[in-house]
Structure formats: C-alpha cells, structure tokens
Image: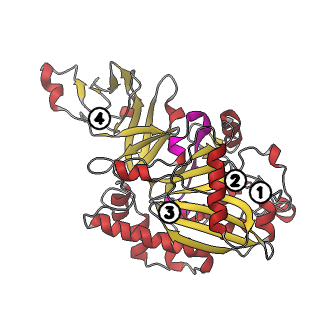
C-alpha cells in the first residue's frame, strides 16, 4: 500500500503538482482528428486540469490556445474561424495558430495587436489523434512505433470517457490477471462475427478462443522486464507440459500500453487526464494484415459511446446495464459483452481517485508495483531538473520500434523465441512494414 502523500503525488495532475509537471514533458492526446473534420473545426479541450481551445485554420494548420481571450477573458471556443485564425466573438480580437494577435479591430492604434499574445501550444497529428504539448522547452520526438509509422488505411483511432482518475484506468491495462475474471464469458463467440472486438478472437497459432483460455487458466505466471520505453509484461498460462498461452504486452511510459487485439492487430492506448477525477482513453488500432474496416470499427464502438463527448451509454447512472440473469448464465459481471464496460465499472467503482492506502497487493500485481515505482522515480527526476524517461530526441526516437506483442499458443519453454518469431511474421505479412532491427 502507499501513503496518502504518495498517492496524491501520483494522481494529481493540475498546474503546480509534481505529477502534472511530469506529464507535461510528453505529448498528450487532445482530440481525435475526426473531431475537427467538420465545417467548424473548433473544439473546447480540458486537459491536465486546464482549459484550451483547439482549432484548424483555413490552411489546415492545427493550433491550441488558452481558452479565454487575452482581452477580457471571453471564451474562444465560441469564436469565429476566419481570416487566418480564430476570432473572439466578444470584441473581434483575432489569433493565429501560434497565438499571435492579428487584429484588435476596436482599437484606434493599428499596431496595438502586436503587443498582444495568446498563449499557444505545439500540436501535431499522428495516427488519427491530435496531440498537444503543454510542457517546457521543445517537445520530444515521436518514437517510430508501429502505430505512428503505419499508413492511414491500416490504423483506426477512437476514444472513450472514464469518470475517474487516469492512473487507476491505466493500471487495469497492465494487470494481466483480471482478464480471467472481469472479462470471463461462459460461452465463446465466433471470431468471424466479432471483427475488432477485444477478447473475441482466437489466440494465434491455434483454434482456441481467447475467452476459453481466460476462463480455463486463471493463475498465470507474470514476468516483467525494464525496457527503453517502460516495461515489458509477459503472461504465461500453462496448458500442458509442452504448450502454453503466451501474451506479451507493454507499458509505454508515462501513460500508455500496447496490447494485441488479435493475431494481426494491436492496440496502442493512452490514458489522459481531463482533470484529477476524470479521463479519456485514446487508442490507435494498427493492422498488420488487411486495411482496417474503419466504418465497422467505428460503428461497433458507437454502440457504447455517444457523440459528441464519447461518453458511455452504460454508466453509473444505469448500473452499467447490470443484469443478474446474465451474470448467472453468460458473463462474470452481468454487464454485457463489451469489455470496456467491465473495465469502466471496475475502475469507477474504486472512487474518483482510488485510495491506495487501503490496498492489499499480491504477486499478480507485479507490473502495477513496478510501474508505480517507475512513475515516482520520474516525478522526482522531473522535480529535480532532470530529464525523465522517454523524453526523446530525434536520434533516440528512431531507434524505438514496435513494441512487439503476441497472444498465441506456443512452447512452454522458450517463449522469447516464439514472441520474436511471431512478431517477425507479422511484419513480413504486413504490406506496409519492413522488418527492422527491433527494440524489445
């Protein structure tokens, strides 16, 4: 368990907090690209406890500014996109994507606008997500991870709202043991009818549904290893003396993980604080096989998440759709077939900010324990003026590839070779990929 002070240090993200100072060293997902694809690409964004306005000008350039106008604090999210920037609806002050004030039309002195600056933030688009940088100095380089180098046709991005602190949502993604319980199904669906749905495919190199493996083998062996980008997590479930279910996933510091969705698709997922008590997950699905059916992927996820805020239809207000008859016969939770609902219930039920002073951790929590240590070390390093992990320059970023994942049935011994061979096959089969010298 942690002390109350340490828990605060890990979870609070606003300006002036140690945890918030650390996260501001990294690119943060601010919106999906599709959210700025309409006739008025202007969006209010709340991120790390601060309020911004994100927009795209007529030339297609992204910009993110402090939300309240430098003049007298009116809300720029209701501004007019025109004349090369975003114009405040109060007095017509006009700002470009870099925060330069182009016009102050009510002022008699023409050069008055040159003295005005609205604070702006670097913004880039990668993999269908618009990322913003809120920190000091120049932003870090993006690593050459698969989700960032795959062509648009082979990626799909989505997001979802979670009504609690970001850290407890991230931690469920590096907890391999929970899947045998929280995501247990008492029957196995046909993978052909469940395109793009988590935990509904067969495990690679077998005809065994992942749901059956999770249901039948509930006590995995979990190993972790430090990597250049964070942590590697290997989970093995022994099937017999010769074979095992092998699942390799990754924690990408500071707040993302990479997991396999199926034999030929991965999920790279960030957990992004809105503020201390709410968050979004942002995911890039990357295909190593056929181009992604984006419409089907989107339609499937919109069954749960409602636009425009991507908030789940099943939530605390309706008990997450809990059905005791379903719990008795079909699923462990009684909350439907979408595992995002299961995860959402689990982390939201911990409270707005999970009280880690009351925990009793076991061996299956090894990845969570190691991640918290890594996070605390990085918070201290940033507070001391050092360079936290994964704040990359261009040369270091080019050396980071993958990360390699697998979910398959392989030999009980020598899982490392099986994992590497499986990933190499993915790269050979992918129309867009070259087999690089991978970083494990």
What's the magenta region?
147-170
Q: Crowdedness of circle 4 by 10 Å Cα count: few (<14), some, many (20+)?
A: many
Compared with 66, 40 (above or below) is above
Q: Is residue 413 magenta?
A: no
Q: CA distance from mark 3 to mark 1?
A: 34 Å
Q: Crowdedness of circle 1 by 10 Å Cα count: few (<14), some, many (20+)?
A: few
Q: CA distance from mark 4 to mark 1?
A: 57 Å
Label whose residue precedes the other's in the sequence (2 or 3): 3
Residue located 44% across and 64% down the image = 11
Which structural element holds mark 3? helix
The circle on residue 205 is 1
Residue located 55% across and 78% down the image = 359
Please name the residue that numbered disc 4 is placed on: 69
Please name the residue that numbered disc 2 is placed on: 318
State the image coordinates of residue 336 (x, y, percent, origin top left).
77, 54
Q: Are marks 3 and 1 in contact (CB under 8 Å)?
A: no
Please name the residue that numbered disc 3 is placed on: 167
Which structural element holds mark 2? helix
């Amino acid at each position: 368990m942690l002390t109350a002070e340490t828990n605060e240090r890990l979870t609070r993200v606003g300006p002036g907090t140690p945890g918030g100072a650390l996260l501001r060293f990294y690119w943060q997902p601010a919106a999906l690209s599709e959210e700025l694809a309409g006739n008025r690409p202007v969006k209010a964004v709340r991120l790390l406890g601060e309020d911004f306005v994100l927009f795209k000008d007529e030339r297609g350039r992204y910009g993110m500014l402090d939300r309240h106008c430098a003049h007298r604090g009116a809300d720029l999210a209701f501004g007019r996109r025109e004349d090369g920037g975003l114009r405040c609806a109060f007095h017509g002050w006009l700002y470009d994507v870099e925060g330069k004030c182009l016009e102050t039309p009510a002022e008699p002195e023409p050069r008055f606008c040159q003295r005005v600056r609205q604070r702006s933030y670097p913004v880039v688009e990668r993999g269908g997500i618009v990322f913003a940088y809120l920190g000091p100095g120049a932003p870090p380089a993006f690593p050459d991870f698969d989700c960032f180098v795959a062509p648009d046709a082979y990626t799909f991005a989505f997001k979802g709202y979670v009504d609690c602190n970001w850290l407890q949502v991230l931690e469920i993604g590096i907890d391999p043991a929970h899947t045998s319980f929280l995501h247990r199904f008492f029957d196995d669906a046909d993978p052909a009818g469940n395109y793009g749905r988590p935990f509904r495919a067969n495990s690679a190199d077998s005809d065994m549904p992942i749901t059956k493996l999770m249901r039948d083998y509930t006590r995995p062996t979990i190993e972790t290893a430090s990597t250049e980008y964070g942590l590697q997590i290997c989970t093995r479930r022994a099937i017999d003396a010769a074979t095992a279910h092998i699942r390799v996933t990754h924690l990408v510091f500071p707040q993302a993980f990479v997991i396999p969705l199926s034999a030929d698709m991965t999920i790279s997922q960030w957990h992004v604080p809105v503020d201390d008590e709410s968050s979004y997950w942002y995911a890039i699905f990357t295909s190593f096989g056929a181009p992604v059916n984006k419409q089907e992927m989107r339609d499937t996820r919109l069954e749960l998440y409602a636009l425009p805020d991507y908030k789940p239809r099943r939530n605390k207000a309706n008990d997450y759709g809990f059905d005791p008859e379903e719990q008795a016969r079909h699923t462990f939770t009684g909350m439907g077939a979408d595992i995002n609902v299961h995860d959402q219930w689990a982390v939201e039920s911990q409270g707005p900010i999970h009280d880690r002073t009351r925990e009793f951790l076991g061996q299956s929590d090894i990845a969570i324990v190691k991640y918290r240590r890594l996070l605390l070390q990085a918070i201290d390093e940033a507070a001391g003026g050092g360079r936290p992990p994964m704040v990359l320059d261009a040369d270091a970023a080019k050396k980071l590839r993958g990360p390699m994942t697998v979910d398959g049935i392989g030999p009980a011994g020598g899982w490392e070779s099986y994992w590497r061979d499986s990933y190499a096959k993915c790269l050979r089969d992918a129309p867009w990929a070259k087999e690089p010298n991978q970083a494990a």
